[in-house]
């Protein structure tokens, strides 16, 4: 299937990129790391659509799934920056311990 | 001349398709605004927009890349969901535009005696053509309505559509490859692929008994026109009664396996907890003690002509319309409550184009008192299954078939 797509990939990617430029994430520490890593595979509306309901633990699970299940090449240090940014900007606090 | 790439794309691949869409299928106008469900996450309200992919009407854009677009609910007021309003769902962002003349379908695998390849012309010419009406339903439709929310594409009501699918029986094509007695599953693969080499390619499997079912097709047309690019052109698998995760788009490879497919999309994704859903057709070879692959569609319904907060008057004739569906046992009844579920009356059932199709229902009532009228629809099927009153929680947010409630404002 990869041999089928060389030409069409560019063709499709261009208009998609133009549209998705409208999707902005909040400026905050970690913003650039999130954009550089997450946008390799998907537009950033995925992040905003999944807010605001995830605890830091759930955001961590999502980031780890992207690395372990989907093979995203993200260093551990960057994974922490990404998780912290998402939990702070697009998450909810962990439930208080009883 | 100022021609954008998008214009070229539209002109090259979709003009021909559009002209074949029946006029009746183009009648419904897209809505002016998205009607969100109050339960959807706030983030969805911020990013969802009405936007048209090339060849499509404006749909509810949830994500650009990969493209995930849902059908606005007003389209479900008609039995057949128009091709250009049919929802779009991809897992992975590399989506080639397949040329039917260059397309090949490979049929083989360890469980096949005589592997072979088909061109598009051979597929259409060498096997009997059949047509079946069936609902195509994303497993995660209404995930956005889950409380508490679960991560994933936050679908509202519209990751579903009903169409007449035409093509050839999968079992006829497999018979030509010779199914060995050791074969247990059929692996399905499409032309789309991930942007990263390490991401698992989207491939699925069906248990052999299901792949050999009379109703399962390699479809090349929907509603009398070629499949739209975004719905799997030139050919996709259609598994009536099962959720769309098995309906492989742009299918290019069928592999008869002698052992269960071991990949992310079978072993980890699209799993439901054991024992929580009333499933008759199970995929036993892929089950474990705690969970199982999603299979059949649960009995369900949608109210298609009323929305929350809509104003009506005391004494006015109010029509309630909608669609009901299930996993292929057939809809037995749809009941309507106009008082939030305290009392119920039977709705009229409309055309019955087949057990896998939408079944329209309608009900007329006259509000007697001003205030709120809470309309609830409850579908049941012919094997006695009914929509659930309470959400059945599951980690990935599948099988939302909670009875829908629409609150009307009744004025004096």
Image: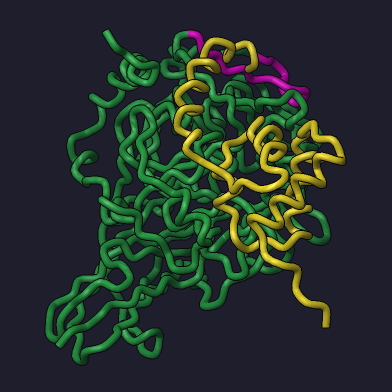
Chain colours: A yellow, B green
The outermost residue toward the front is A28
Q: Nearer the viewer, residue B373 or B409?
A: B409
- Give residue B403's quadrant in the image: bottom left
What residue is shown at x 21% (from left), y 89% (from top)?
B370
Q: What percent of the width, then of the height, locates residue B240?
A: 49, 46
Give the quarter of the figure containing the N terminus of chain B.
top left
What residue is shown at x 79% (from left), y 31% (from top)?
A73
Q: Is residue B353 left or right of residue B410?
A: right
Vertical order, B285 against B36 (above or below):
above
Q: What percent of the width, then of the height, locates residue B392?
A: 62, 70
Q: Is residue B205 visible?
A: no
Give the quarter of the figure containing the C terminus of chain B.
bottom left
Q: Is residue A68 left or right of residue B406?
A: right
Span shown in magenta: B102-115
The outermost residue toward the right is A76
The secondary structure that dominates the magenta segment is loop
What residue is shown at x 31% (from left), y 13% (from top)?
B3
Q: How many marks?
A: 0
- Give residue B367's quadrant in the image: bottom left
- Give residue B225's quadrant in the image: top left
Q: Is residue B267 left or right of residue A32?
A: right
Q: What percent of the width, then of the height, locates residue B236?
A: 50, 30
Residue A11 on the magenta segment: no
Q: Nearer the viewer, residue A15 or B339?
A: A15
What residue is shown at x 71% (from left), y 56% (from top)?
A87
Vertical order, A24 against A61 (above or below):
above
Q: Nearer the viewer, residue B228 or A38?
A: A38
Q: Is residue B87 visible?
A: yes
Q: What percent of the width, then of the height, locates residue B127?
A: 46, 21
Vertical order, B83 against B302 (above or below):
above
């Amino acid at each position: 299937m990869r041999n089928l797509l060389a030409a069409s990939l560019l063709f499709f990617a261009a208009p998609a990129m133009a549209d998705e430029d409208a999707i902005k994430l909040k400026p905050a520490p970690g913003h650039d790391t999130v954009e550089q890593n997450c946008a390799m595979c998907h537009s950033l509306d995925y992040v905003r659509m999944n807010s605001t309901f995830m605890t830091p633990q759930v955001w961590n699970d999502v980031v780890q799934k992207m690395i372990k299940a989907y093979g995203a090449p993200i260093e551990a240090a960057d994974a922490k920056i990404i998780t912290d940014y998402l939990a702070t900007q697009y998450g909810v606090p962990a439930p208080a311990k009883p | 001349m100022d021609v954008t790439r998008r214009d070229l794309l539209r002109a090259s691949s979709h003009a021909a398709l559009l002209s074949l869409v029946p006029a009746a299928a183009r009648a419904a106008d897209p809505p002016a605004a998205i009607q969100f469900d109050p339960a959807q996450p706030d983030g969805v309200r911020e990013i969802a927009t009405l936007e048209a992919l090339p060849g499509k009407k404006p749909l509810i854009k949830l994500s650009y890349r990969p493209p995930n677009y849902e059908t606005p609910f007003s389209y479900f007021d008609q039995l057949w969901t128009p091709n250009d309003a049919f929802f779009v769902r991809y897992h992975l962002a590399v989506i080639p535009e397949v040329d039917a003349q260059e397309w090949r379908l490979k049929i083989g695998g360890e469980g096949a005696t005589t592997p072979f390849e088909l061109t598009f012309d051979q597929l259409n010419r060498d096997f009997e053509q059949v047509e079946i009406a069936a609902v195509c339903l994303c497993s995660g439709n209404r995930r956005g309505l889950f409380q508490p929310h679960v991560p994933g594409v936050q679908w509202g009501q519209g990751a579903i559509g009903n169409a007449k699918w035409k093509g050839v029986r999968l079992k006829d094509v497999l018979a030509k490859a010779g199914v060995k007695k050791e074969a247990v599953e059929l692996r399905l693969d499409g032309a789309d692929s991930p942007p990263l080499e390490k991401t698992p390619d989207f491939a699925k499997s069906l248990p052999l008994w299901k792949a050999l079912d009379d109703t399962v097709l390699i479809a090349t047309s929907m509603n009398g026109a070629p499949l739209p690019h975004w719905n799997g052109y030139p050919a996709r698998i259609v598994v009536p009664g099962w959720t769309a995760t098995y309906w492989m788009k742009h299918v290019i490879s069928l592999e008869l396996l002698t052992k269960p497919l071991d990949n992310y999309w079978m072993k980890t994704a699209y799993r439901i907890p054991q024992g929580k859903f009333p499933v008759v057709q199970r995929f036993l070879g892929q089950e474990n003690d705690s969970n199982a692959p999603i299979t059949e569609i649960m009995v369900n319904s949608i109210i298609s002509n009323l929305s929350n907060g809509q104003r009506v008057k005391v004494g006015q004739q109010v029509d309630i319309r909608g669609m009901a569906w299930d996993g292929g046992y057939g809809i037995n009844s749809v009941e309507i409550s106009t008082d939030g579920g305290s009392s119920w009356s039977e709705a009229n059932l409309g055309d019955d184009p087949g057990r896998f199709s939408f079944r329209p229902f309608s009900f007329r009532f006259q509000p007697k008192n001003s205030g709120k009228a809470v309309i609830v629809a409850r579908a049941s099927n012919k094997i006695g299954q009914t929509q659930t009153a309470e959400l059945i929680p599951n980690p990935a947010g599948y099988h939302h078939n909670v009875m829908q409630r629409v609150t009307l404002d009744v004025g004096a």
